[in-house]
Amino acid sequence: MKDTYPKMYLYKRIVQAKMFIDEHFAEQIDIDNIADEACFSKFHFIRIFKKTYGKTPHQYLTYTRLENAKQLLKKDMSVTEVCFAVSFDSLSSFTGLFKREVGITPSEYRSQQLTLKNDIKNKPSKYVPGCFASKFAQFKNSNSQEVNS
Amino acid sequence: MISKISHSCIFVLDQDSAYDFYVNKLGFNVITDASFGEKGRWLTVSPKETKGFEIVLMAAKAGMMFDESSAEAMRGLINSGKMGGASYECEDIYATYEELKTKGVNFTKEPTKEFYGIAAVFTDDSGNWASLTQKK
């Protein structure tokens, strides 16, 4: 990769900025500071970040917060707890943005996911394709036996 | 007429370790994680932008799909580096390569220009190889 060394140097800084967002999404992140840390002008940083990841750093931060919010909602945390855990300023902005991006409200998503989680727990073979299930001699038993195992 | 593929298996040595690799390092979503108690665990994952296709992280151990002798044979193949073959795509291979390297993923081939794009090869935590491609 000799001819790509300068490019890799550039990538290292952009990737570090992306990974910083991945790790610190729950804090109040200042995009200007990230650009400074990455030794870019803000304009240059935003342009290269978007070229690499298809989103501006701010869009990526919001996306990361929503993705993590989805994971926390699956864990049975309340919508309010999740909202502040991923560093949204208000419940209304969180709910509005979540609905716009995911298509349903956080509470609807939470309810849907908890129902799914319980169903997987109680009837796991429902989620295994029949071709695999037939391979598993043990699975020929009923769902109730699976749950009790 | 076959219209779609829904599942395909990657055989792994340890499902907990595979979960950590595919979810925390590669960033895949968990689609189903269902316990069958002592009978086993049905664990499927998928790259974030892939819809309707699940990678089954199947334990190479006696129980679900194997008897003990075939499980041992499968573990031998995995340990020898002969298993794998998954082919993943990304938008920007240099950025993806840099991030995965930072997270400790082992690359056996650095991003290299090929006639079809830029390709790299890495191994998962079990030793299954997989290619990563940025298409032209």
Image: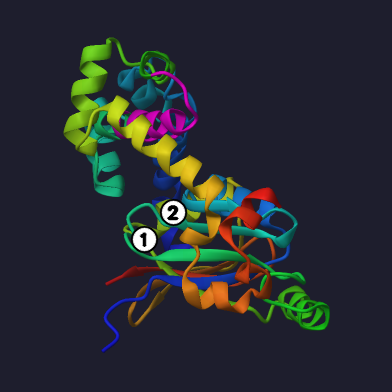
Viewer-proximal residue among B122 and A66: A66
Q: First in sequence: mark 1 or mark 2?
A: 1
Q: Tell me if residue A89 comes above or below residue A3 in the rendering.
A: above
Residue in the picture at 47% in, 26% down = A76
Give, as a single range, the part of the protein colored magenta: A62-78
Q: Main secondary structure of the magenta part?
A: helix
Residue found at the far top of this picture: A90
- Measured as percent of width and height from the top left, residue A114 is found at 43, 35
Taking the image as drawn, is residue A136 in sight? yes
Question: On the image, numbered disc 2 is attached to which residue?
Answer: B96
- Measured as percent of width and height from the top left, residue B76 is found at 79, 79
Secondary structure of residue under mark 1: loop
Crowding at label 1, few (<14), some or many (≥20) Cα neighbours within 10 Å?
Answer: some
Left or right: where does residue B79 sit relative to residue B23? right
Q: Tell me if residue B133 comes above or below residue B36 in the rendering.
A: below
Crowding at label 2, few (<14), some or many (≥20) Cα neighbours within 10 Å?
Answer: many
Q: What residue type is labelled 2?
A: Thr
Left or right: where does residue A104 sit relative to residue B87? left
Structural distance between the alpha carbons of marks 1 and 2: 7 Å
Viewer-proximal residue among B55 and B106: B55
- Chain ID, mark 2: B
Residue in the picture at 34% in, 60% down = B50
| Residue B65 found in image quarter | bottom right
Asked if the residues shown at circle 1 and circle 2 are in contact, with their CB atoms under 8 angstroms apart, the answer is yes
